[in-house]
Image (cartoon, rainbow, N blue to C red):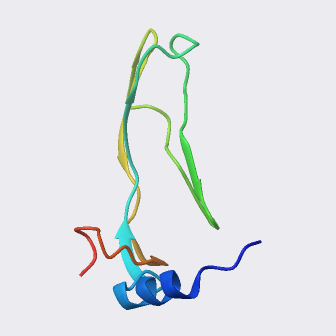
Amino acid sequence: METMDPEIKKRALAQGFFEMDNYEFLFEIGQGITLPKSNYDYRVQVSLNNLDWKTKIPKEKKGEYVRWSERSELITKWSLPKNPNSVFSA
């Protein structure tokens, strides 16, 4: 592994690239189209680090189309590296 050039690291530190920030997010699953099996109870699972979230059975299904219209709970204080160029970073 190569070490970072000290001048580049100094500029990155000054711009906040190594700071952490807390974020909030949620998962929202709407619909699936042209799925392999018709009228099947598909479920969607989202896994991120130590978090797993899975939809319930679809609210509607017609042929190769299914609709879930589900949102996860709000996930708060997820600590990620701050992006000083992002509109979401304060």
> Front-most of 45 and 24?
24
How many numbered markers are drawn? 0
> Front-most of 19 and 60?
19
Q: Residue at x 50, y 14 (%)?
A: 39
Relative to 53, residue 29 above or below: above
Is residue 29 shown to the viewer in this render?
A: yes
- Quarter of the picture holding the C terminus: bottom left
Q: Which residue is drawn at 47% across and 90% down?
A: 10
Quadrant in the rendering for residue 36: top right
Relative to 79, residue 55 above or below: above
Q: Position of residue 77 (x, y in %)?
A: 42, 81
> Front-most of 25 and 12?
12
Q: Farthest residue toward the right?
A: 1
Q: Position of residue 62 (x, y in %)?
A: 40, 12
Q: Residue at x 55, y 36 (%)?
A: 43
> Front-most of 22 and 55?
22
Is residue 20 shown to the viewer in this render?
A: no
User: In the image, is 1 to the left or to the right of 85?
Assistant: right
- Quarter of the picture holding the N terminus: bottom right
User: In the image, is 49 to the left or to the right of 62?
Assistant: right
Quadrant in the rendering for residue 82: bottom left
Relative to 11, residue 50 above or below: above
Q: Residue at x 57, y 88 (%)?
A: 6
Q: Position of residue 88 (x, y in %)?
A: 26, 70
